[in-house]
Amino acid sequence: QVTLVESGGGLVQAGESLRLSCAGSGRSLDYLTTAWFRRAPGKAHEFVAAKRWNIVTIDYSESVQGRFTMSTDSRNNMVYLQMNNLKPEDTAVYYCAAGTSNSPVVTKSSDGYNSWGQGTQVTVSS
């Protein structure tokens, strides 16, 4: 497993932007699938975005498509989530995750990952 630590969450108003960071240590993220999930109170983990290992394109949920951008930085072993035009419904704890599958089905489920960060709270007020 790789150790993951998220940062960058906070309180913002609707329409504003936030950038989340996920720092990996212990293993290179280049050879793993990395992803962002979010969890609102009383709900299960919701898929946000994933960069699948050995796959060029990044997958996004329809709810964030066009507003969120995931990126990776191999040199610094980091992944990011740029969140623009935030909405109150984006409020959740955001987690980064890593795993070994590159299946487009498996990697959209939280069950497809074996390494998780501690989470960072994102709150969007209206």
Image: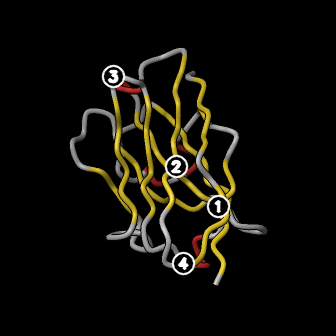
Categorize mark 3 by other alpha carbons within 10 Å: few (<14), some (14-19), many (20+).
few
Residue in the picture at 69% in, 56% down: 121
Residue in the picture at 54% in, 40% down: 97
Residue in the picture at 24% in, 40% down: 55
Give the quarter of the image for residue 52.
top left
How many numbered callouts? 4
Q: What SS does tag 4 mark?
A: loop
According to the picture, the residue beneath numbered tag 3 turns out to be 75
According to the picture, the residue beneath numbered tag 1 turns out to be 122
Between the residue at mark 1 and the residue at mark 3, the CA separation in whole angstroms equals: 27 Å
Query: In the rendered structure, are the residues bearing label 1 and label 4 in contact, judged by CB atoms less than 8 Å apart?
Result: no
According to the picture, the residue beneath numbered tag 4 turns out to be 87
Residue positioned most to the left:
56
Q: Earlier in the sequence, mark 4 or mark 2?
A: 2
Query: In the rendered structure, are the residues bearing label 2 and label 1 in contact, judged by CB atoms less than 8 Å apart?
Result: yes
Q: What SS does tag 1 mark?
A: strand
- 55 above or below 18? above
Left of 114 or right of it: where is 52? left
Residue in the picture at 44% in, 74% down: 85
Horizontal and vertical percent position of residue 106: 45, 48
Horizontal and vertical percent position of residue 7: 61, 42
Left of 87 or right of it: where is 73? left
